[in-house]
Amino acid sequence: MDYATLSRISVKHLTVMHVLLMTHSVTATANILCVTPSSVSKALAQLKTQLNDELFFRTGNQLAPTQYALSIGPAIHNVLSNINGIFQQGEFAPETFTGTLSLSMRESTFELFAPQLGDISQQLSDHAQLVISTKEQFSFEALLSGKIDFLLLPHDISQPPTHSKNLVWKAILSDEMVCLMNRHHPLANDELTIEKYLSCRHIRVIDKDLAEPYFEQTLTQRHGARNIATMVADFGSAALMCQHSPYLFTCSKRWAETALQGKGLVAKPLPFDYGQVAYSLVWNTVSLNNPACRWLHDQLVVDKA
């Protein structure tokens, strides 16, 4: 270990770098850290020299991180989280908390967890914030770099879509899958067989982060591939398309029973074995060094099955 080099880099330097990676702005970083913009600029200049990299370059009014800056972001987050854990000991009191807690999810996932999240928000003080972003905006990389605290998403239990050793997965809500169709569909009053399922065209939800769903792989290997007519961004869009077309939409049963967009659609069990599905909470291992994150974690993992 190069102690001489380490002695020249302070927690302040790492904190400035971490916040800059989130804000891409010297002024915004200064406001968050309650220091002057010149102090942030000075720390950044020192880091550039110590790390022998430009770290950021200006594009308009924003700072764009270099590839090297992006690559060291998760490591800096881990270091700061571990240091934070040393100083943040004892019980967490949500009614006196004044910081920010964050999580990311699909809009469809919010349909199921809105009551629980509303209760969590109300337990926090009037000076705290619960920030809920979309998965399209902040996903697994954001967890690793500390931009969000948790990710909440549906997936095949047999197939977590990331193998990062720093991310922990916990299923917190069991589910099953159903096939939706509008009430005028030719199959609305029939038993859904695998032959009828495959004879129709389908709607699929796009997800650039998740691997090919296990149910899709199993279906293709055992019975044949679905004929995808259209691909949309989220469950709500798929359900609306289903309302106005002869297409089938395969989705979460819990979502279909809860969401307004699913009202009036006919739901049928899938005619093949597709494995187990659930909604899982995902977090970076170092995040739980923060008492506030531990508290939010405990609120979200209560048994809802």
Image (cartoon, helix red, strand yellow):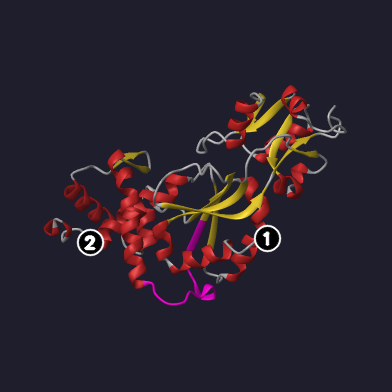
Q: Is residue 36 shown to the viewer in this render?
A: yes
Q: Amino acid at mark 1?
A: Pro
Res 189 quadrant in image: top right
Residue 215 location, x and y as percent?
A: 62, 35
- Sequence-first disc among 1 and 2: 2
Residue at the spot of label 1? 115
Q: Amino acid at mark 2?
A: Ser
* 147 lies above or below 252: below
Residue density around tag 1, few if under 14, some if 14–19, many if 20 or more, within 10 Å: few
Numbered tag placed on residue 10 in the rendering: 2
Depth check, front residue: 18 or 227: 227
Does the magenta-highlighted stretch encompass residue 49? no
> Could you tell me what secondary structure mostly forms the magenta stretch?
loop
Q: CA distance from mark 1 to mark 2?
A: 42 Å
Q: Secondary structure at mark 1?
A: helix
Q: Which residue appears farthest toward the left when viewing the image?
A: 4
Looking at the image, residue 215 sits to the left or right of residue 137; the answer is right
**Image point (36%, 49%), residue name:** 21
Bounds of the magenta segment: 88-102
Does the magenta-highlighted stretch encompass residue 95? yes
**Image point (39%, 54%), residue name:** 28
Q: Secondary structure at mark 2?
A: loop
Residue 70 location, x and y as percent?
A: 33, 43
Residue 244 location, x and y as percent?
A: 78, 30
